[in-house]
Amino acid sequence: MAAPLTLLLLVAVTVRAALYRSSLADLISERVEVVSPLTAWKRVVEGLALLDLGVSPYSGDVFHETPLIIYLFHFLVDYAEITFMLADVITAVALYLSVKDYNKQVFRKQKYALEADRYPLDCLELIRSPKEMQYIPLKVAMFYLLNPFTILSCVAKSTCGLNNAVIALFVLSTIKGNSRTHSSPAEGNSIYPLTLCAAALLYLLQRQYIPVNLRRFSFWWFVAQYAFMYLGSLFVIVGLSFFLLGSWDFLPSVYGFILSVPDLTPNIGLFWYFFAEMFEHFRLFFLCVFQINVFFYTVPLSIKLKEHPVFLIFMQLAVISIFKSYPTVGDIALYMAFLPVWSHLHRFLRNIFLVSCVLLACSALFPVLWHLWIYAGSANSNFYYAITLLFNVAQILLVSDYFYAFLRREHHLSHGLYLKRKDGSEATLVLK
Amino acid sequence: MGLLSDPNRRRALISLLTRLNAPICVVCYMAGVAWFMGLAFEPFTLRTYMSENAMGSTMVEERFPAGERALGTGREFSAHKKKAGGMPVDWLVKTMQSRGLEVFTQRFSRRLPFPDEDKERYMVKGTNVYGILRAPRAPRTEALVLSAPCSPGDDNNQAVGVLLGLAQYFRNQVFWAKDIIFLVNEHDLIGMQAWLEGYHHTNTTGMDWSPLQGRGGSIQAALSLELSSDVVTSLDLVLEGLNGQLPNLDLANLFYAFCQKIGVLCTTQGKLQRNDWDSVSGYSHAVQTMMLMVMKQASGRPWGDHGLFLRYHIEAATIKGINSFRQYKTDATTIGRLLEGMYRKLNNLLERLHQSYFFYLMPSLSHFVSIGYYMPAFGLLALILLLRVSFQPRLLTTYLLTDGVPGVLSVLTPLVISHLTGVALYTLPIHFQEIAVEHFPVSETEAVVLTAIAVYTAGLALPHNTHRLLTGRGTENGWKVLKLVAVLYLAVLLGCTALINFSLGFILALTLVPVAAFVTPDVPKALSAFIMVILSPACTLLFSVFLFQELQEMPVSFLDGWMLYLSVISQGILDHALYGSLVYPLVALLVYPCWLLFWNILFWK
């Protein structure tokens, strides 16, 4: 399996290197779909210039990445292209390894269940074979590396690629079950991946065979341990940032910037238009509503999916990338990389074709409507926002479709594939 | 949401769509065409009205008196032009200075990628002369432009005369709140391009020009004047700019309002408007006017010197004087008054023209069709594509699961090959002109056009053969997946095109949608191949040329039409190279490869 992966990495790096050399690179790095105020390379360069002058990079309201990123590029600025390609490669390899491990566990679990005769007889066609699972890790790596969204993001040198790498490493360390090295650098980069810790906690509990039972001491003890580790590493990260920078400037400038959304540059998210149109005195209220919205899904999803933490991670990543304040296509690429893992759900998916067509069409329409709005002057921001809305609705449909399919498969695995009504006639499942 | 999640209702809907697919498609196509033809019917259109308050309610007086003197200046200009054998720069500078303007010149030069045989130019060198009338009333942050071309021969001398006359008259008025720039540009659009790039400090086409020494404020609106006779019978308004962009409708409204007020006959597309909309001839007249606008817009080329302003968010139009055999004539004084009135209203603008429509079609100057009315015509055609896609949603996943890598390859190869053919069509004609000229007895321009046609025709033979060679026999599902991909591709492509340039999108949809809807490997080969070639983009262009001549009431013989067709192709390539028109790359790189995919399906083995 190493050979195809190496080949894939080579192809991916070649494509990126070729694009870096072409005239498209400048064009791509200006696209608002690809870079956000948070992740734009232009802003990192500005921050570096300020840092070199001995001024705080956060003065001047241009740079909003974390101190760790700017100090990383303080040393690597000449090798930026290689760094971004490397970040993509690391993400892909981390995803590859974690999915491989996860598949092994799924298969083992399935074997135990089969031996214990826990599946109904007519569900045999739902059982997954090792043959079909063999290429899934490779497909995951391919979905990430060759996804046009990732390529665009990498060519634009959007720091989103680095955040993705950190999140992928976080997923890998969770799946490897190593709670010692499992730290929270992902949280150092932005606030939203905080919600992933619920999924990680559930996963580790499952691995240690600790039941999720609120009355049990062992459960609370483990949660406390985890929380201690988690907060400790968060504290280390923030402390490190402070010592590197020598001031607390970065707190309002990074986390405050993410939470209070002062920059309303158009992007593919839902915030900018809404807050640009809003009366000032409603701003705080809706800011809270919008931000709580991102975090709120963690609770019901964790309860519903407490047996399936990896699927929960996928759902969380998708929710974050749809509802976060400055989303870019790089965020979407990360959760889309997980889609091959759920390829066994395809028989239960209902709108996947329609949704992928809408996503494709929207991706083509973004630049067209941008052109009409900004360059031709004949359209306006409503046109662009309409496409943004459609794009996000399609993403939500995609994710909920997978969610539904996943639950339905689980339902069939416990109740049999061919459901009967009480009177014996054939029943269909309806989601209402 | 019930429709998407309830399996029973979904099944019913899908079975309905599958059963009635072909009839629904035919009905949609007819409805789309009928809707489009109905747009010109007057009760379905809206009357134009002035949306911009700053230009609407305020009254202005027009007092320009000096038409005869302006014509005299025009004659003087003509004499100096003849003597100088081109732009009489010194004389113009002196004349403008004597009228109290700040005068500057700009030199530019440009080598065309191949000789332009229509306008007989290859190495272009010229000078633009412009004078700025500084606004006495306000900070000089905004400007208006009045331009007249310095054309070879005896054309447009009167336009320069009127321009200079207006400059002199405007100089004595105190109410100007915007700088007014009087521009005389040489070599029509090339000069205009140089001047605009200089004014905005951009260089998009790699042209050589000297930087501008003087600038006004940001330009709010511009008019370009073309006048070749001392008296005119009517004034024609030209709106279509680069890539089918149109100025804000208020500019057309302004022109129309002043023509009504002063009593000048005004036309658009060279067609007077008629009042008998309820008669057949009246309706067909409106259809002709609208079709002319659609075809001009679809061509994507600037139809007057104003065409390049639109790229910089400047609302602009060209006003052409037409002298025909009518009794009633309008003299230069009246034209001057009309322009004076328009500039005084534009001078009142508080912000850029933005109130009215940017997307519209005009069946006559007093009526328009807005985007909300004409988009359904395109939507009905695009719906056919979606219907053809809708009944095979499971195909893609099952295909990927059953046929695996060779299956994917057999679909990917035609995609790649047809796009490479497209790239060849885009790059080869200009690069191969020298080789072609050496080996064949043709001129450079002919070489470019004939190479383009040769590559285009070669593309028909190339892809499906190569594909068969590479991957052996295609499977039954293979062509279905290829068709699915091609139909989706076409839908997205046409949708994007129609948003930027409705006319182009609509014309392409008219010809490509039937092909996309009904082509399969099972239909009779020879007949369908013939139909497909007839409906291919190149033939569409050929028919458009004939139709355009027909609509302009200048029908041509087949041979002349063919020559015209060749020159249209060369002009399209030139427009792309000189001004950045997008039609040629769009057709070569996207539309043609997409059509090749359908061609591939027809010959799927």
Image (cartoon, coloured by chain):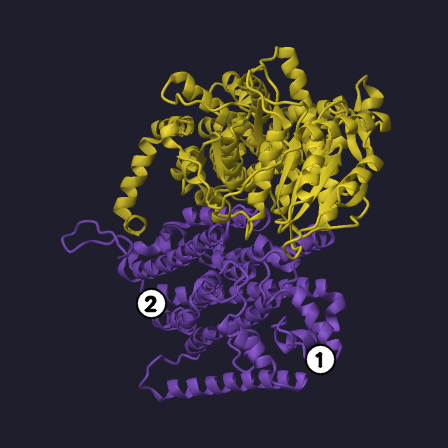
Label 1 element class: loop
Badges 1 and 2, same chain: yes
Percent position of residue B203, x then y: 74, 47
Q: Viewed as shown, does residue A356 lie left or right of B329?
A: left
Q: Is residue B115 above or below residue B215?
A: above
Chain shaded purple: A
Disc 2 target residue: A116
Label 2 element class: loop
Q: Is residue B72 above or below residue A258?
A: above
Q: Residue at x 62, y 57 (%)?
A: A5
Disc 1 target residue: A55
Q: Visible in this render: residue A147?
A: no
Amino acid on which the number 1 mark rests in the picture: Val
Instruction: Name the disc covering residue B18, or none.
Output: none
The one nearer the camera, A138 or B259, is B259
Chain B color in figure: yellow
